[in-house]
Image (spheres, coloured by chain):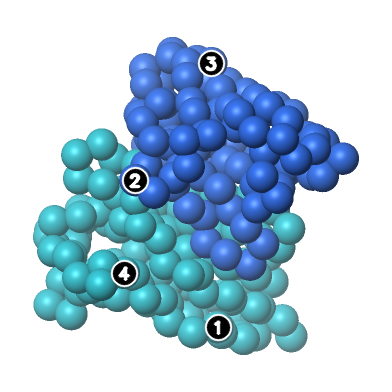
Chain colours: A cyan, B blue
Amino acid sequence: EVQLVQSGAEVKKPGESLKISCKGSGYNFTTHWIAWVRQMPGKGLEWMGIIYPGDSDTRYSPSFQDQVTISADKSISTAYLQWSSLKASDTAIYYCARRNPLDWYFDLWGRGTLVTVSS
Amino acid sequence: DIQMTQSPSTLSASVGDRVTITCRASQSISSWLAWYQQKPGKAPKLLIYKTSSLESGVPSRFSGSGSGTEFTLTISSLQPDDFVTYYCQQYNIYPYTFGQGTKLEIK
């Protein structure tokens, strides 16, 4: 089955670090860009950035540049989103999504990872 | 960044109605526009790509049109399952920005 499986929900304190994951299966992970999308509680979708697992070429939205790090390990078909110092405002659901290689829309989504940052 | 503006933000309608949601881009995005449906507590689901191409498995009551800076999503006959939130997204230029969403409510 073609799918993106995301890591489980996290509860963290402000200032802590965190790395969440998105594992692809059922397709060639190396040749499909993977994006990360944020959805804050009760709000809309925000495009954070995107990575090409084949060579780790990464692009960030200016809004998220220097706030998070996107990486990938093609050997285990997994993309990551990480924070070095979480803030309460990072509380959100984070989705990974696969970009269609021919037409660049997002054709496959993970179920999302809820990150809660609270003291 | 390209700004995507959806209207209306909320739309009240009845089962069987025909509704249209509009998405405007702050600059031309050619036809590089997708529409997603999001149900509560679920990930977004692709409905339409490249402005008017229907994703496999999506009911034919959904259709899209437009080009350049103005786009529409039309649902020809609303079903109970359609009363959720819809987002447009441009994928012409990074960052691939989304509209703010349109919530479809039962009248």
Q: Are marks 1 and 4 in contact (CB under 8 Å)?
A: no
Give me the C-alpha separation between circle 1 and circle 4: 18 Å
Secondary element type, mark 4: strand
Circle 3 chain? B
Name the quadrant containing residue B9: top right
Q: Are marks 2 and 3 in contact (CB under 8 Å)?
A: no
Identify the amino acid type marked 3. Glu
**x and y percentages locating residue A38 in the rendered image:** 54, 58
Instruction: Check disc 4 and report the residue beneath it.
Output: A3
Q: Residues within 10 Å of mark 2 (few under 14, many from 20)?
A: few
Identify the amino acid type marked 4. Gln
Identify the amino acid type marked 2. Ser
> If you read the primary sequence from the N terminus, does the residue marked by circle 2 or circle 3 appear first?
2
- Quarter of the picture holding the N terminus of chain A: bottom left
Instruction: Check disc 1 and report the residue beneath it.
Output: A9
> If you read the primary sequence from the N terminus, does the residue marked by circle 1 or circle 4 appear first?
4
Q: Residues within 10 Å of mark 3 (few under 14, many from 20)?
A: many
Residue at the image position 17 percent from the left and 65 percent from the top: A27
Q: Are marks 2 and 1 in contact (CB under 8 Å)?
A: no
